[in-house]
Amino acid sequence: MKKVAVIMGSDSDLPVVKKAIDTLSEYGVPYEVHVYSAHRTPEEARSFSMNARKNGFGAIIAAAGKAAHLAGALAANTTLPVIGIPVKSSNLDGVDALLSTVQMPSGIPVATVAIDGAANAALLSIEMLAIEDAGLAEKLDAARAKASAAVLEKNRKISEEFNK
Ligand code: RP5
């Protein structure tokens, strides 16, 4: 199976990024986690994404806050899909990072999830790997079925209480 790269701009992003790591672990998807900053370690960030495909990665998750250009900088050097997580790490509550990450000019896409949306970033990367992996697709289907059943059970309880 291809690996997923989880890159964060700073170790201060880890509490958010942890949900992505946990989700990848739950699904048994192999991953690597690194701290590479687009502005503090631009060479390392560039080198990682340039070599990511040949190093066995299938997708890259990039988490950054403030003037968040990490996802775009990684996307500039690879044609692997890059998923950006805008991190809420500033006085602007992550809106700065959201706009920086989502507003990529044409030609270099970054699929952007919600502010601090690390679990969805991991799920999206898993869906990408599941295009060619039936076992992974089955796990995704099972998780959706479980989530539906949980909501229906909540509906049953609420209906019992209020719809007499
Ligand atoms: C961004 O600046 C990082 O992704 C982090 O969200 C934010 C603050 O970084 P630190 O000053 O905590 O290292 O580059």
Image (tube, helix red, strand yellow):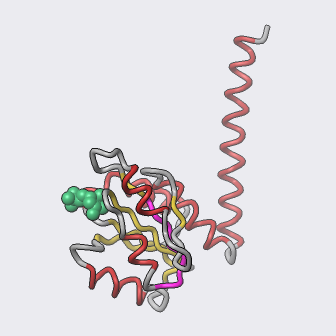
- Decide if residue 45 is on the left or right side of residue 121: left
Q: Position of residue 31 (x, y in %)?
A: 44, 72
Q: Position of residue 27 (x, y in %)?
A: 55, 62
Looking at the rendering, the quadrant in which ligand 1 lies is bottom left
In this view, which residue lies farthest toward the top? 164
In this view, which residue lies farthest toward the right? 164
164 or 105, nearer to the observer? 105
Q: Is residue 49 above or below residue 125?
A: below
Q: Position of residue 52 (x, y in %)?
A: 44, 85
Regarding residue 62, the answer to whether it shows in the image is yes
Q: Is residue 52 above or below residue 97?
A: below
The quarter of the displayed image where residue 9 is located: bottom left
In this view, which residue lies farthest toward the front? 105
Q: Residue shown at 53%/84% (left/top)? A: 79
Regarding residue 36, the answer to whether it shows in the image is no
Bounds of the magenta segment? 78-85
Which quadrant, please, contains the C terminus? top right
